[in-house]
Amino acid sequence: MFRKTWKTLKIFLIIIVVIICLPRSILPNHNSESELTDLESYLKQNEGETRLMEFKDNEDALKMKLMQLDIINASRKKYKAAPVKLDILASRVANKMCREAAENNFLGHWNMAGEKPYHRYAFAGGHDHVSENAFGEWSSENYTVSSSNIISMMRKGHETFMAEKAPHDGHKKTVIEKAHNFAGIGFYLSGKQFRYYEEFIDRYFEFSDIPSEVKVNEPCSITVQTDRENFLYYLIIYRENFPETMTPAQIKRKGSYEDYTDETYQETAAWDLAGYKSGTSYKIPLQFSREGLYYIHIYSDKKEITTPVSLNTKGKTSGSGIVIKVRGNM
């Protein structure tokens, strides 16, 4: 009996020694190598991004956002949508909106400058298409500011979006839209107010030489770089007046926002866009005849179209959210 027990004990001790001596890479690890690599990559991106520095996340906030990103991607996976990556600039845009909304006690898609999501992202230097979800919560007592509380409240905000039922499920549809490939995450918790914003990004082009502001009738251009598998299909430019300041009460009365305006300024079809193509790059000349904001949507297709045919952008994804300010000659 003693020999059998001792033999069993020796085997058990040998197993323990082997486990201790095994390389760490073979053992299961909660912080996997891929997770650590992702964090290191995002930390580098965070350090390298110079825009909206006053709304930069520290390392703890970035870790919380990566945890929240896993929750977002789990929701997308249920609906067969590919995972999104965290976008640093969009996260800072969301942070800025969260703070303003919390400190001024409102929730909505407009800020107090009267800017919609695509305005705020473009004015921060973004050129991709953006779609926004917003969540807020408030209390009669001060919230406890802690990582665990913030993590819990962000999760609650996202779960609120995913619990929506048709036909009132706009936030849920935004989360699971298959075209999204990046997302910005913002939060702000202070006093009696909590805000959480998701900014989903559709990034399919590279842009250069995008003017932020030009004068009326001043010639300018935008350069759009595509990959080798896609070609520009359609360009639509919407015009609108400059935003006007809004009060928190006015913002609260607003609901969802439109991703376009009632005034279409210009439409350019694939065969005309093809004339501006050199290699995989398109240099598109523009000129604006009136003051205002000009919001540019650009669509692509797998097929290059060089002669007039019937076109339809229904079901296609806009890969741009360019906004150019046009002012009169002074």
Image (cartoon, rainbow, N blue to C red):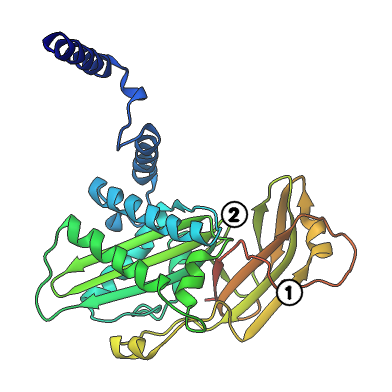
Precedes in sequence: disc 1 or disc 2:
2
Classify mark 2: residues with Cα within 10 Å, few (<14), some (14-19) or many (20+): few
For label 1, the residue is 267
Amino acid found under the numbered disc labelled 2: Asp
When the figure is inspected, residue 288 is found, relative to residue 55, above or below; the finding is: below
Q: Is residue 112 left or right of residue 149?
A: right
- Residue at image point 85% right, 72% down: 310
Residue 306 % position (x, y): 87, 59
**SS at mark 2 in the image:** loop
Residue positioned most to the front: 1
Q: In which quadrant of the rendered view does residue 251 lie?
A: bottom left
Direction from residue 108 to residue 12 in the image, left or right: left
Residue furthest to the top: 3
- Dot 1 amino acid type: Glu
Residue 16 percent coordinates (x, y)? 22, 18
Closer to the eye: label 1 or 2: 1
User: Disc 2 designates what residue?
Assistant: 209
Q: Around disc 1, counting alpha carbons within 10 Å, would you say few (fewer than 14), some (14 to 19), or many (20 or more)? A: few
Q: Position of residue 189 (x, y in %)?
A: 20, 66
Towards the viewer: 143 or 27? 27
Residue name at image x 15 percent, y 8 percent: 3
Do labels 1 and 2 touch, CB within 8 Å? no
191 with respect to 165 (left or right): left
Residue depicted at 56% across the width and 56% down the height: 203
User: Would residue 282 appear left or right of 69 to someone viewing this image?
Assistant: right
Give SS at disc 1. Answer: strand
Indicate which disc residue 206 carries: none
Q: Is residue 126 visible to the viewer in this orientation of the structure?
A: no
